[in-house]
Image (cartoon, grey):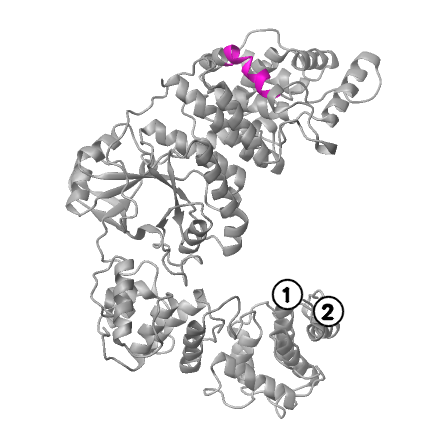
Amino acid sequence: MADEMVRRAQQFVNQVYGSRIGMTVTENGQTGWNTMYALTRALQWELGITSLSNSFGPTTLSTLTSKYPKLNASTVPSADFCRIIQSAMYCKGYDGGDIDGTYNSRVQAGMSKLKTDMGVDIAFPGSDLTPKVFKGLLNMDAYVTVNSGSDAIRSVQRWLNGRYVNRQDFFIIPCDGHNSRDVSKSMLFAIQYELGMADGTANGVFGPGTQSGLKSHTVTVGDAGTWALLFSAGMILNKRPVSFGGFTTATQSAVRDFQNFVALPVTGVGDFSTWASLLVSYGDQSRKGEACDGVTLITPARAAALKAEGIKYVGRYLTNPDPTPSDDLKHKAIQPGELGTIADSGLRCFPIYQTFGRDAGDFSYAQGRAAGQAAINAALDHGFKPGTRIFFAVDFDALDSDVTNNVLPHFKGIQDAVEDDGIRFAIGVYGPRNVCTRVGEAGHSGASFVSDMSSGFSGNFGYPLPADWAYDQIVTKWVGSGDGAIEIDNNIASGRDIGQNSFNKPRTQVPDVGFGSSYLNALGIDLSKYMRSIGYADDGGTGTDARLFTHTQCFETIMSHDALITQLSNTYNMRKALIQTSAYWEMRHYDLIDQAVDHQVASYHLNGVGAVKDSSTGIAQISGNVGIRAWNYCIDNGHATGTKLEPTKDADIWTMWQRVNQDNAYSVRTVSLIHLWDAGGKPGGINPPGGESVMRSMRLDYTESEIFEVLRRYQGWGTEAEEHAGKRMAIYQIFEKYNSILRNP
């Protein structure tokens, strides 16, 4: 909702400072970071700072403190300087007068209200504007509860501000009723100040000095004073039901509940381990966990070392995305015979799926569909039985907006894939606290594996442990010695998931076989469901985006060539799903524009009319040029026989174009040759300078990253090719689901 006074503030900063500060803001009457940045720059300009910045940093604070330690009606240096203050007040929701350049009674009352809301009215009495309050004025923090904020948390926030605002490195935190990164860090500063750390030494980090000091400050029933207040503050910020104050019997009961929840010894006292769990995500890292995960092969000697350490549950990865891993990652994925070793040693294994997942761009609905089916296929390959929970990784510092826009749609895709598969496997999520909580609350997972070791992640700092946590990753360490030495991530286990200790016989990487009819209908249904889920109607759709072939036509066309595709797969050591995916996807995309361009190509070669001599055509959308280059490459490398054509000659282009346009079997065969060419680096100069890199030679055990790369290269370069390859990965995994069943009866 637009606010007229905010609009006037925006008009003021644009008119007076726009050319001076190198930026203007949209005059929409809505407060936002850009308006705050502009006002910050305007302040810096008035202070004589020559290197302007969006940040109200140390230079701005020190310069302001030096020149104007208190701003009021007598000390404000100019009318425009005062208007900056008045404008900022309106942007924060406080009365700033008429933006008339006078620090009048309305401004003074608004300033007093602001400081009271911040909790600094005792530290900074009256209506003067002090530098730290000015810093708090020029950001987007709220000082009243917003978005259903907690009054108890706001009380803690105001208390922290009031008690510590005069310390050098403590800055005013929001008082909005929500815990956050800044609020959690302010708690660490408060602890350090109470431990006697000097300004400049206190740093808001849970380091050795802080930990050592806390071990001398256990709190229990009857304790009052600052340490009891700080402990109750930590409980409140972790959303535990206690009153802000002394350590009462009610506090003791809540502490017992909290200790039980986070799997600490239930003592009812605020000991070091409890302090640690309240203050940082990883808690007391000296705790011994009953679970671990790692990228190292579990041998009998290592299994014995884990058992001796008290480990019961071992997390191992279903796949290794790196086709050429370094020595320390070559066993990231479960190795042949390893699950048997784990079971024989009395341990249990919980599977983790992580192929892509290092930034928000790796997460979308379509990629989730692919990940879900890929994880199922891999779990079955390794021998995991139905009922196993697979933990899908979100291994990056996901902002809350990333969770909304990317991670939640991704897990909806995973959930749909698992449901379409018959819910043989359960879904878990691995990631920071906020990711795990939100995915679970959305109904997309049933248990969380929390990456609490990454304490600096924005999704960990300031968020409570998810209610459905199964494993809590707290520290990396070595256990065992000699042949049994192994580096692990030590995890606390809640018992919500216990992995598996009995496995089916693993499926082997054998060649593909003919499809037959037993699963034909199920395959068609799965493909149809997926394509509809990403916007492709079974009937091809209507309007300008309409495709000319239905799902049934495309599916039946591809499957009618199953014998040929099987033969090509066996000949080239290439998974059938690669050929099936490219052909099916391209045929589903043939539209009116493609048809019109095809007519132009025919007109050029048959009638000499027009200038369009080539196009992507036929069921697999192959151009004459690409077909020639793929065949030439494969003839040169012994993959195919025939007469090489010249890709620059019209007659040869027309010859190849007619073949891939009219002969579906020839198009299917050419798909396999293009994939071989893709893996070989597509020499021939049709790509950007240098062409593609050469991949590992075609093989049945390509990693998912290699499969993605082959599918992407089929389409070419650029954003669209990347996006489409991500969507085609799910198609590949659906075809592979049934192909793998048939080749492993």
Query: Which label belongs to residue 19?
Result: 2
Instruction: Judge the density around disc 1: few (<14), some (14-19), many (≥20) Cα neighbours within 10 Å.
Output: some
**Which residue type carries mark 2?**
Ser
* Relative image position of residue 64 (x, y in whole percent): 56, 81
Task: Work out whether residue 250 or residue 460 is closer to the camera in this orientation and state it.
Answer: 250
Q: Quadrant of residue 465?
A: bottom left
Left or right for 408, reference 193: right
* Relative image position of residue 4 (x, y in whole percent): 72, 73
- State how far apart marks 2 and 1 are (Cα): 15 Å
Is 241 located above or below residue 341 in the figure? below
**Which residue type carries mark 1?**
Asn
Magenta-drawn stretch contains 557: yes
Look at the image and give the residue range highlighted in magenta.
Answer: 554-565
Magenta-drawn stretch contains 328: no
Left or right for 613, reference 72: right
Secondary element under disc 1, as helix, strand or loop, is: helix
Kindly report which numbered mark, 2 or 1, lies closer to the viewer in this rendering.
1
Q: Which residue is mark 1?
A: 34
Question: Which secondary structure dominates the residues rendered in magenta?
Answer: helix
Task: Work out whether residue 546 or residue 732 is closer to the camera in this orientation and state it.
Answer: 546
